Image (cartoon, rainbow, N blue to C red):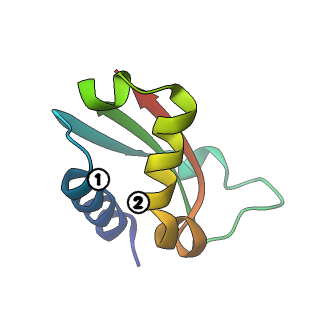
Amino acid sequence: MNINQLIEIVKNKLNKNIVCDNIEVEDKTFLHTNHSSHDKNKFNIKLIITSNYLKKKSKIQSTKDIYKILDKELKENIHSIQILII
């Protein structure tokens, strides 16, 4: 899987399961390529989600919801994820 495929999957899954006004996915893998734990088959991404639905929840609950939706991708394709809810 390449980063563009992963971004598309992440956006689609989140849009289907969470009420969002906007979702941005940034590839931050380049910041981690020199780390000893770097895996060329996994990506580091940043999610910027505009959602009143998620803002009404606690940060912990919002994060749990996102992790549940992206469970497969987190296990197979994502090394780390940064989440910003606005």
The amino acid beneath tag 2 is: Ile
The quarter of the picture where the C terminus appears is top left
The residue that appears at 36% across and 33% down in the rendered structure is: 48
On the image, which quarter does residue 20 sit in?
Answer: top left
Viewer-side residue, 78 vs 4: 78
Q: Which mark is residue 14?
A: 1
Q: Residue 51 carries which label?
A: none
Report x, y in % for residue 17: 26, 54
On the image, which quarter does residue 70 sit in?
Answer: bottom left
Mark 1 is surrounded, within 10 Å at the Cα level, by few (under 14), some (14 to 19) or many (20 or more) other residues, namely some
Report x, y in % for residue 54: 35, 31
Inspect this view and state whether residue 80 appears. yes
Looking at the image, residue 75 sits to the left or right of residue 11; the answer is right
1 or 2: tag closer to the N-terminus: 1
Looking at the image, residue 10 sits to the left or right of residue 78; the answer is left
Q: In this view, does 66 lie above or below 8?
A: above
The quarter of the picture where the N terminus appears is bottom left
Report x, y in % for residue 53: 27, 30
Q: In this view, does 39 lie above or below 57?
A: below
Viewer-side residue, 76 vs 28: 76
User: Residues under labels 1 and 2: Cα distance?
Assistant: 7 Å
Mark 2 is surrounded, within 10 Å at the Cα level, by few (under 14), some (14 to 19) or many (20 or more) other residues, namely some
The residue that appears at 36% across and 66% down in the rendered structure is: 6
Q: Do the residues labelled 1 and 2 touch (CB within 8 Å)?
A: yes
Inspect this view and state whether residue 51 appears. no
Mark 2 sits on what residue? 69
The residue lying furthest to the right in this view is 36
Q: In this view, does 56 lie above or below 36?
A: above
Report x, y in % for residue 13: 28, 61
The amino acid beneath tag 1 is: Leu
| Dot 1: element | helix
